[in-house]
Image: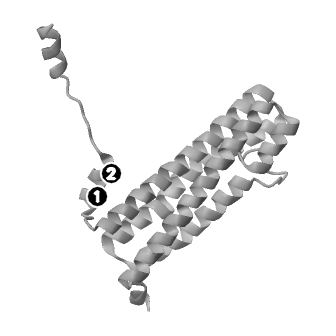
Amino acid sequence: MAAENSYYSRIPINKVNHFENLLSRYEISDETQVGLLKASYLAFWGCVWCLSWNFLVVTNLWFEKGDASKTKAFILAFAYMTLGIPTAFVSWFRSLWEAFRTGDGAMFEKFFVFSLVHIGLCIFASVAPPVPVLSDSLTGFFSALHMFYDGPGVYGFLYYIGAVLFGLEAGLSIWLLNRVNAYYRERGLFLEMV
């Protein structure tokens, strides 16, 4: 028994907190900034979760149906995930980190613009209006209704879950934008742009 305990005690366990490593790397210590960056970290991973859920649901529907419209929906869902996640990281997530690191007002402006685009796309994905080109490639409310009436019922529930996820992501992103704007105005960084 003692030999087993000594064996397992020699196995290195790497308990790394990546968020804390980012904070120390960028030398950010203000509590307000840390709280906003944690919220942005959560919003980014929420975006990853939403796009991954969308891709998984559309892929399962494509495997079951397999017709031409579902193939187009699969290709579009794959494009949303493979292009949306890196674009979100580069456009609004990294620009917020750089804005807090440097205090540059232009980086805050970049975050505000791309965050508004992100919020608009999340709301559009949550609603998923019946545009013929999209063809059920977004898990939104209208697509969920379409799946309840036209497709297998279980996909209606899965599409509804995707719509709720996109709605929660839009709400979190709106809250984050509001809090960063308050921080930006409170610090007087907008006056540097004039």
Image position, residue 101 (x, y; %): 31, 69
* Callout 2: SS: helix
Q: Give the residue drawn at x 65%, y 42%.
A: 54
In front of the other: 67 or 29: 29
Q: Quadrant of residue 99?
A: bottom left
In 3D space, how far apart are the residues under numbered discs 1 and 2 (Cα atoms)?
Answer: 6 Å
What x and y, as percent, mark residue 56? 63, 35
Residue 127 lies, in percent from the top left, at 74, 55
Q: Is residue 70 left or right of residue 192?
A: right
The amino acid pointed to by label 2 is: Phe
Instruction: Check the image and report above or below for 45 versus 179.
Output: above
Q: Residue furthest top?
A: 1
Callout 1: few (<14), some (14-19), or many (20+) C-alpha neighbours within 10 Å?
some
Q: Position of residue 59 (x, y in %)?
A: 68, 34
Q: Nearer the viewer, residue 163 or 60?
A: 163
In the rendered image of this protein, does residue 53 appear above or below residue 65? below
Residues packed near mark 2 inside 10 Å, few (<14), some (14 to 19) or many (20 plus):
few
Mark seen at residue 19:
2
Q: Are marks 1 and 2 in contact (CB under 8 Å)?
A: yes
Left or right of residue 64: residue 108: left
Q: Which mark is residue 115?
A: none
Residue 23's disc number: 1
Q: Quadrant of the N terminus?
A: top left
Q: Secondary structure beneath disc 1?
A: helix
Residue type at mark 1: give it: Leu
